[in-house]
Amino acid sequence: MTPTQRHRVLALTPHTRLLSVWQTLGIQTSHRCVRGPETGMAMVRGRMGGSGSAFNLGEMTLTRASVMLEDGSLGHGWVAGRDQDQAELIALIDACARHESWARRIDTELVEPLAQALEEERAQASRQAAATRVDFFTMVRGE
């Protein structure tokens, strides 16, 4: 799993679920915050039709953090919103995932189950939306 895929899953997972699954791994290491956690704004860009020229859609709140493990490994975390604890936890997981001994466990025991849960939630929401879909049609009257 790439770091980008890992970050996506960690950022989309609710903090309480992420924390509980992380604690079950039992990876214990001390760390210190190098930067943040700090909350700011980020510009969101969009494209008309997905392929047109880029435009500034607006700003969103973003929280970021960087941590350093006792061995000097750095990790970074970003999350939409103001949850500073989640940004720090994501940074800690990122730093731990840079160790070969922990990376495989993090990907298989943490990230993959969380990704599967996110996909199931997305599919359930899609099924609910499809169940309420209304098909509109135009009836042509001939006179």
Image (cartoon, rainbow, N blue to C red):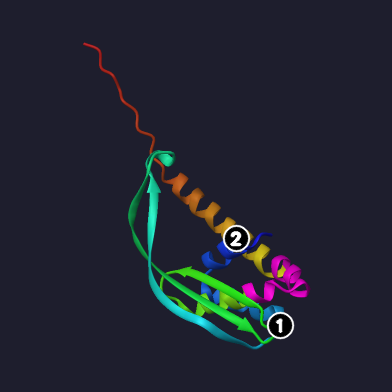
Residue at image point 39% right, 35% down: 135
Question: Helix or strand or loop: what does disc 1 sit on?
Answer: loop
What amino acid does circle 2 point to?
Thr
Q: Which mark is residue 36?
A: none
Magenta run includes residue 96: yes
Q: Quadrant of the N terminus?
A: bottom right
On the image, the x and y values in percent for residue 62 come to 42, 69
Q: How many callouts does the rendering have?
A: 2
What amino acid does circle 1 point to?
Gly
Residue at image point 71% right, 82% down: 26
Magenta run includes residue 101: yes
Q: Which residue is mark 1?
A: 26
Residue in front for this viewpoint, 135 or 56: 56
Residue in front for this viewpoint, 108 or 16: 108
Is residue 21 visible to us here?
Answer: no
Q: Magenta segment range?
A: 94-108
On the image, the x and y values in percent for residue 96 come to 68, 76
On the image, the x and y values in percent for residue 7 come to 58, 65
On the image, the x and y values in percent for residue 17 come to 57, 73
Relative placement, left or right, of 6 versus 139 is right
Relative placement, left or right, of 119 versus 97 is left
Residue at image point 57% right, 75% down: 91
Q: Which residue is mark 2?
A: 4
**Residue farthest to the front?**
72
Is residue 52 visible to us here?
Answer: yes
